[in-house]
Amino acid sequence: MAVKSLFNGVKPTTTAETTLYTAGSTANGMRVVKFVASNDTGAAATYTVRIYSASGTPDHIQPVTVVNRYKVHVPPALPGVVIPANGRLTVQVNPANSISFTGAGES
C-alpha cells in the first residue's frame, strides 16, 4: 500500500463545515496515516473533524480542539481511522482562515 497526499496546506475560508477529502469507491476506503492542523495566526483557534460514511452519517468525530497561536496539533485518535468508500473527511474551523490542514492516507 502506497501512502498518498490527501490534502496539503488547505485553509478553510469559512466557519462552515468544509470537505477536505472524499474517498473513492474502493472497498477498503482510505486509512488516515497523517493529519496535522497548523495555526499560523496570532490568536488561538478551534477545529472539529468529522468522517462521514457514504450515506452521510458521521462515523468518527474528533471533538472541538483548540490550537494555540503559532502552534501545530496532531490529533492522536485520527491516524488509523478509515474514511469509508465514498465517505468524506470534513473540518470546521473558528475563526475562518486560521488553521491549515495537511493529511495523507493509504487505501
Image: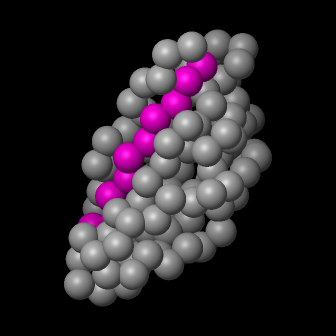
Q: Is residue 55 visible?
A: yes
Residue at x 55%, y 24% (from the top left corner): 106
Name the magenta segment's main secondary structure: strand
Which quadrant does the C terminus fall into?
top right
The answer to if 41 sits in the magenta stretch is: no
Q: Is residue 82 above or below residue 12?
A: above
Residue in the image at 65% along x and 68% along y = 63
**From this viewpoint, is residue 17 visible?**
no
- Place residue 7 in its image quadrant: top left
Left or right: residue 16 versus residue 24 is left
Q: Is residue 100 above or below residue 4?
A: below
Write down the quadrant of residue 88 in the picture.
top right
Magenta range is 97-107
19 to 87, vertically: above or below: below
Task: Give me the residue at 56% from left, 44% from top.
Answer: 89
Residue 62, given in percent of the width and then of the height, sits at 65, 61
Q: How is the image coloured?
A: one colour
Quarter holding the N terminus is top right
